[in-house]
Image: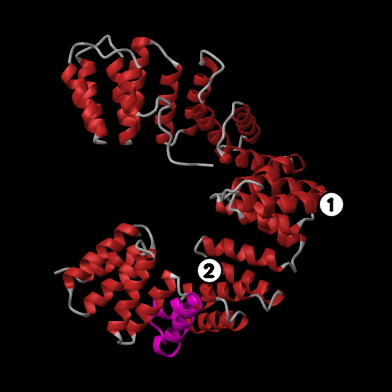
């Protein structure tokens, strides 16, 4: 569970001006100005001003603590670590300083040493009334590095201390489900009864556990839990449960296949798990399909094709496999075969808008047979899902390509009304403006595309368009 970078426990930077030792009487204007800059969220300026004050008060740590805290808020984590450690050298370490240094280290991406600092803060806390925010930091960090037992212990401690956030109970229930499903039923049932966004997932996981318990097969129990966690995109917890499943039954092909997916989704290598799945069950369409997706995710569509084709032969009526085959052929610029498989997907699922959208975007993106096939597919996608910004965008650009600029612009603007951050729609609007000779508007649209999708496909297309259309 990774949220935004947590700040100091001390109720925000502004509060530090009052809860640390009283500000030195010298340099009052500097402290007042720093407080004003902080209120304006000009954290870097505040930090530098406070550091200058600290240099004029070489035996006082107060200004350095404030400067380091402002650096954290400014995202200047390396500088923050240095200033906070200088403060500790002057006045000694405190739990709050350990927490602040841990926050800065986390900001640098050094979670291991951040955990060390937070653990030190917890060990040195002067009484048993430990702030919940510190426990939350450590629980999140432990879960991130796979220390699930430690994370669970801290979540229990938070609950016993009266933490009222339903998320705490939910995370504790998920950790238990992944590691000891039978013990998780009570917590999951409690979450399922709450009127929160977590209730549906808790109920689904509870149902999976009850099914597994009724079957009396521990491997199957962990496999069902792992599959449900995959559905929830709780990849690390899914990995834990599925690893348990294959450890209990090394012939459990589906568990191996989903384990590969969980590993891939964390940036790990799922290939050995997929290979185990196919070795155990070569006729499993799931194993073949997910192994094909593994190569597609790596951008290796040629390597994906044998597995996707094998999956399709084993499950000929599955539209998702057909669509993925279309994508694999399209990635190799084999447009005729891509068309065959995208068309097969909509034939198998004629009422599913996602497959019509894939067919439409294939024709529109390649500007191939747009009038003949792309435009009708886009109309189908938009008609079946009128609230889809992607469908409106595909239809809008199909209209532009086929010469209906007026209605094309209306649809592209409709897409942006549905999703103001849709990079594809801004790119297509830029192309429309360029066709209309509105070079300034086109450049603005391409620049906005780039800001929304700097590393993605539309950002790259926007860079090319800006270069081609430069004066």
Left or right placement of residue 133 versus residue 53 in this view: right
Of helix, strand and loop, which one carries label 2? helix
Residue 261, how many percent across, how many down? 61, 56
Q: Nearer the viewer, mark 1 or mark 2?
A: 1
How packed is label 2: few (under 14 Cα within 10 Å), some, or many (20 or more)? many
* 227 and 197: which is toward the camera: 197
Q: Is residue 162 above or below residue 165?
A: above
Residue on which disc 1 sits: 214
Residue 356 in the magenta stretch? The answer is: no
Marking on residue 301: 2
Query: In this view of the protein, can residue 250 be seen by the observer?
Result: no
In the picture, the quarter occupied by the N terminus is top right
Left or right placement of residue 437 versus residue 289 in this view: left
Tell me which numbered mark, 1 or 2, is placed earlier along the sequence: 1
Residue positioned 44% across, 83% down in the render: 379
Left or right placement of residue 175 versus residue 109 in this view: right
Name the residue at the right extreme.
216
The region drawn magenta spans 357-385
Residue positioned 37% across, 57% down in the render: 455
> In which quadrant of the rendered view does residue 408 lie?
bottom left
Query: In this view of the protein, can residue 284 be seen by the observer?
Result: yes
- Please name the predominant secondary structure of the magenta segment in the image: helix
Left or right placement of residue 185 versus residue 265 in this view: right
């Amino acid at each position: 569970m990774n949220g935004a970078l947590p700040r100091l426990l001390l109720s925000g930077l502004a509060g530090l001006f009052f809860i640390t030792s009283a500000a030195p009487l010298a340099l009052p204007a500097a402290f007042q100005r720093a407080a004003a800059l902080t209120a304006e969220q000009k954290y870097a300026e505040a930090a530098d001003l406070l550091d200058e004050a600290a240099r004029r008060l070489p035996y006082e740590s107060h200004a350095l603590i404030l400067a380091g805290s402002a650096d954290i808020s400014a995202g200047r984590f390396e500088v923050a670590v240095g200033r906070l450690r200088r403060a500790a050298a002057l006045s000694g370490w405190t739990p709050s300083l350990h927490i602040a240094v841990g926050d800065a280290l986390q900001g640098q991406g050094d979670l291991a040493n951040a955990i060390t600092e937070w653990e030190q803060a917890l060990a040195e806390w002067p009484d048993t009334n430990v702030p919940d925010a510190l426990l939350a930091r450590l629980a999140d960090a432990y879960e991130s590095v796979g220390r699930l037992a430690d994370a669970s212990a801290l979540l229990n401690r938070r609950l016993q201390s009266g933490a009222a956030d339903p998320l705490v109970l939910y995370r504790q229930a998920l950790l238990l489900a992944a590691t000891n499903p039978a013990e998780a039923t009570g917590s999951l049932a409690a979450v399922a009864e709450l009127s929160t966004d977590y209730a549906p997932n808790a109920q689904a996981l509870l149902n999976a556990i009850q099914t597994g318990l009724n079957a009396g097969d521990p491997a199957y129990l962990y496999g069902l839990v792992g599959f449900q966690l995959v559905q929830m995109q709780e990849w690390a917890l899914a990995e834990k449960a599925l690893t348990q499943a294959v450890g209990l039954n090394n012939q459990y092909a589906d568990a191996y296949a989903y384990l590969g997916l969980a590993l891939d989704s964390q940036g790990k290598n799922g290939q050995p798990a997929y290979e185990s799945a196919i070795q155990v069950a070569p006729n499993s369409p799931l194993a073949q399909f997910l192994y094909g997706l593994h190569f597609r995710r790596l951008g290796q569509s040629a390597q994906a094709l044998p597995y996707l084709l094998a999956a399709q032969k084993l499950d000929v009526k599955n539209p998702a496999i057909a669509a993925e085959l279309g994508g694999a052929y399209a990635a190799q610029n084999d447009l005729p075969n891509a068309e065959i498989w995208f068309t097969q997907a909509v034939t198998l699922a004629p009422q599913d808008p996602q497959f019509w959208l894939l067919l439409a975007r294939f024709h529109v993106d390649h500007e191939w047979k747009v009038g003949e096939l792309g435009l009708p597919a886009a109309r189908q996608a938009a008609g079946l899902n009128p609230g889809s910004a992607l469908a409106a965008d595909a239809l809008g650009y199909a209209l532009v390509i086929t010469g209906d600029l007026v209605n094309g612009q209306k649809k592209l603007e409709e897409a942006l009304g549905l999703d103001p951050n849709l990079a594809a729609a801004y790119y297509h609007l830029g192309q429309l403006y360029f066709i209309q000779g509105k070079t300034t508007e086109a450049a603005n649209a391409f620049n906005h595309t780039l800001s929304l999708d700097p590393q993605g496909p539309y950002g790259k297309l926007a860079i090319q368009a800006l270069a081609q259309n430069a004066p």
